[in-house]
């Protein structure tokens, strides 16, 4: 049995605990939570676990083999660093850290100590994203031209990070996974409306090379919740709508064909529009977090790297940091340093 130590029993922690506890090869050995009401709920849910308000006590607990961190972003680096130094395999809620330098240190430390460092980019384990990846890899969409994504809702405002660090990691991880590529340049614009000097509305523009671009709209001030991604290809187009109860992925046989008309005195390119059928492929229905926990448990036992390892998390942080630099410079184009 893999003894799980969970740091943070707030918004996401109970979901992690539930899925770890449901896995036949994992058990909740300890929970760290400073809020007394949340700590009591954890104690009731897992009566055999040690409940503590000190994360160091949890990390040093002899029954804890794997530390899962579900706390505010600003705490991730310190908690993960201490867990890795203690020889524990570690899962960190997204984003991995607030800076690339911190992420690099954790990745290097995990390699040095031969520990697993994973980042909780849960969406990569959904049946929808897995199907999107399968369709793109098959070439059914043709050459990818663009990604257009909207992730907006009313709240939840974070006290330590802005809307980019809160919401963009989802779409960045999905885009990198689907395209198997990283941006060569970014531009970002944002605005603060809550008096805390943190952007609550932002627009990100990413360039991937080969004329592929991506645009992300992020917003904590929307009256409606939208989680939609459009992927345009040279042959077909795809819509991934996470708010759909069913048919989250739809593929459209739509697009354009360019032709040259020599009879036109300007010899301008002409566009023919193609509108065909739409189909919605069948998706795996397993809970994404359960699939992620199963992957992590297997990694602990076999010592292989998980789908979302520390390097994946570091690459996301690299773009988050570049977007912040762009915002501070009025949307200037920023070329992030490559990560070898």
Image (cartoon, helix red, strand yellow):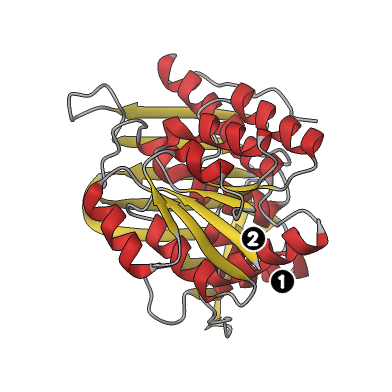
Can residue 172 be spotted in the picture? yes
Residue at 42%, 60% in the rendered image: 228
Classify 160 as above or below 173.
Answer: above
Q: Nearer the viewer, residue 235 or 168?
A: 168
In the rendered structure, which disc, 2 or 1, sits on the residue that comes first in sequence? 1
Residue 149 x, y percent position in the rendering: 46, 52
**Disc number placed over residue 119 in the picture, else none:** none
Q: Nearer the viewer, residue 30 or 199?
A: 30
Residue at 80%, 42% in the rendered image: 114
The quarter holding residue 258 reads bottom right
Residue at 46%, 39% in the rendered image: 55
Residue 48 x, y percent position in the rendering: 45, 66
Residue 161 x, y percent position in the rendering: 37, 32
The residue indicated by pointer 2 is: 233
The residue indicated by pointer 1 is: 140
Q: Residues within 10 Å of mark 2 (few under 14, many from 20)?
A: many
264 relative position to 196: left or right: right
Classify 24 as above or below 260.
Answer: below
Dot 1 falls on a residue whose secondary structure is loop
Q: Nearer the viewer, residue 132 or 25?
A: 25
Quadrant of image for the C terminus: top right
Instruction: Give the mark count.
Output: 2
Quadrant of image for the N terminus: bottom right
> Do the CB atoms of the residues marked 2 and 1 lie less than 8 Å apart?
yes
The quarter holding residue 297 reads bottom right
10 relative position to 106: left or right: left
Q: Nearer the viewer, residue 96 or 22?
A: 22
Classify 58 as above or below 164.
Answer: below
């Amino acid at each position: 049995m893999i003894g799980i130590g969970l740091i943070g029993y707030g918004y996401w922690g109970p979901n992690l605990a539930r899925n770890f506890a449901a896995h036949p090869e994992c058990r909740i050995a300890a929970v760290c939570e400073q809020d007394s009401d949340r700590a009591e709920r954890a104690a009731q849910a897992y009566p055999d676990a040690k409940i503590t308000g000190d994360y160091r006590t949890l990390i040093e607990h002899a029954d804890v083999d794997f530390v899962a961190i579900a706390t505010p972003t600003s705490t991730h680096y310190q908690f993960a660093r201490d867990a890795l130094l203690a020889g524990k395999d570690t899962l960190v809620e997204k984003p991995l850290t607030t800076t690339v330098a911190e992420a690099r240190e954790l990745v290097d430390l995990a390699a040095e100590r031969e520990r697993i460092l994973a980042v909780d980019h849960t969406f990569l384990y959904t049946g929808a994203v897995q199907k999107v990846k399968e369709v793109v890899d098959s070439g059914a969409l043709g050459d990818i031209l663009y990604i257009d994504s909207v992730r907006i809702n009313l709240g939840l405002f974070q006290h330590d990070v802005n809307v980019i660090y809160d919401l963009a990691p989802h779409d960045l991880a999905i885009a990198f996974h689907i395209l198997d590529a990283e941006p060569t340049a970014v531009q970002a614009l944002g605005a603060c409306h809550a008096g805390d000097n943190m952007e609550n509305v932002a627009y990100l523009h990413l360039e991937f090379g080969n004329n592929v671009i991506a645009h992300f709209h992020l917003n904590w001030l929307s009256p409606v919740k939208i989680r939609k991604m459009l992927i345009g290809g040279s042959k077909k187009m795809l819509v991934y709508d996470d708010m759909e109860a069913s048919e989250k992925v739809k593929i459209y046989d739509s697009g354009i064909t360019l032709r040259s008309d020599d009879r036109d005195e300007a010899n301008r390119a002409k566009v023919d529009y193609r509108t065909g059928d739409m189909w919605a492929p069948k998706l795996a229905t397993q809970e994404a977090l359960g699939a992620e926990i199963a992957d992590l448990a297997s990694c602990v036992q076999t010592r292989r790297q998980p789908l979302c390892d520390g390097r994946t998390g570091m690459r996301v942080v690299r773009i988050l940091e570049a977007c912040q630099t762009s915002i501070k410079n009025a949307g200037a184009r920023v070329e992030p340093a490559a990560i070898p």
